[in-house]
Image (tube, grey):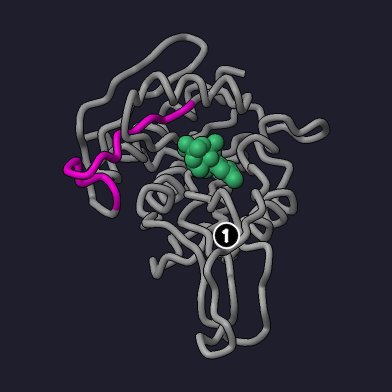
Amino acid sequence: WFDAHADGRLKGQHVLVTAGPTHEPLDPVRYIANRSSGKQGYAIARALAKMGAKVTLVTGPTGLAPPAGVETVKVETARQMLAACEAALPADCAVCCAAVADYRPQIETEHKIKKERGGLSAIPLSENPDILRTLSNHDTARPRLVIGFAAETDDVIGHADAKRKRKGCDWIVANDVSPGTGTMGGDNNTVTILSEDGEEEWDNMPKAAVAGRLADKIADTLLKG
Ligand code: CTP
Ligand code: CA
């Protein structure tokens, strides 16, 4: 497998990584979230640090231990994640692995919602900021290399390539998260890297190996100039 090389190739480079889900509060005891485990993002942060990069990991709630040698910033909501990313700039590269909640409840009450006080029949939502799109289109501090992930269940490559163009990032790491693939929460991943230059399909491998190989590809690209 492709393990990250502890060769210091990325010394002097700052890489920003987002990981995990976001939690969007509804009241003090409830939130909207998703099934992201954060494993792939943490593995990428670890691999980049092993190669000598200065890594800022902005992470939603995961329960994973912060990787050694990585500046880890813990956040809960999409808006906090965006603010932490902006605060971490400038960066040479940004890798957006987080499964950011697309929407947040319009209301956040300070009191627990109670059935006997009318409860809820619907939750009005507002759209969250898009961190990957914001970094890709940053007018003063766009990282030289911006990488997004696309977890899809149907027409994986088609949706992922459209996403890359729509968001303005350089690469999209596409993965199939259909039930049965075991990708969500699992330890392995099958990905295809999409860029302007075409697509590169990688075999199924442990998330740590995907991370090592991606860190290697990032180093090749950043050091090329
Ligand atoms: N992303 C982000 N901020 C958001 C939503 C997504 O930074 N508010 C990033 C993710 O980290 C990922 C990429 O955008 O790198 C694609 O996320 P995805 O949820 O697949 O894209 P969406 O545009 O939200 O489309 P979809 O309707 O498929 O969820
Ligand atoms: Ca989304």
The quarter of the picture where the N terminus appears is top left
Report the residue at 54% width, 54% height from top.
Answer: 57
Q: Position of residue 184 (x, y in %)?
A: 29, 49
Judged from this view, the residue extending furthest toward the right is 140
Q: Quadrant of residue 210?
A: top left
User: Where 52 sits versus 110, above or below?
Assistant: above
Q: Position of residue 86 (x, y in %)?
A: 73, 49
Q: Position of residue 158 (x, y in %)?
A: 40, 19
Judge by depth and name the residue closer to the eye, 32 or 211.
32
Q: Secondary structure at mark 1?
A: strand
The part of the chain drawn in magenta is 172-184
Total numbered labels: 1
Judge by depth and name the residue closer to the eye, 17 or 112.
112
Q: Amino acid at mark 1?
A: Glu
Q: Is residue 161 magenta?
A: no
Report the residue at 47% width, 61% height from top.
Answer: 33
Q: Is residue 17 left or right of residue 47?
A: right
Taking the image as drawn, is residue 96 in sight?
Answer: no
Taking the image as drawn, is residue 18 in sight?
Answer: yes
Q: Position of residue 203 (x, y in %)?
A: 21, 27
Q: Quadrant of residue 170?
A: top right
Task: Please tell me how crowded label 1 is: few (under 14), some (14-19), or many (20+) other residues with Cα within 10 Å.
Answer: some
Q: Is residue 179 magenta?
A: yes
The quarter of the picture where the C terminus appears is top right
Judge by depth and name the residue closer to the eye, 118 or 36.
118
Report the residue at 38% width, 14% height from top.
Answer: 199
Most common SS among magenta residues: loop
Give the residue pinned by disc 1: 71
Judge by depth and name the residue closer to the eye, 33 or 69.
33
Judged from this view, the residue extending furthest toward the bottom is 116
User: Where 60 sits versus 99, above or below?
Assistant: below
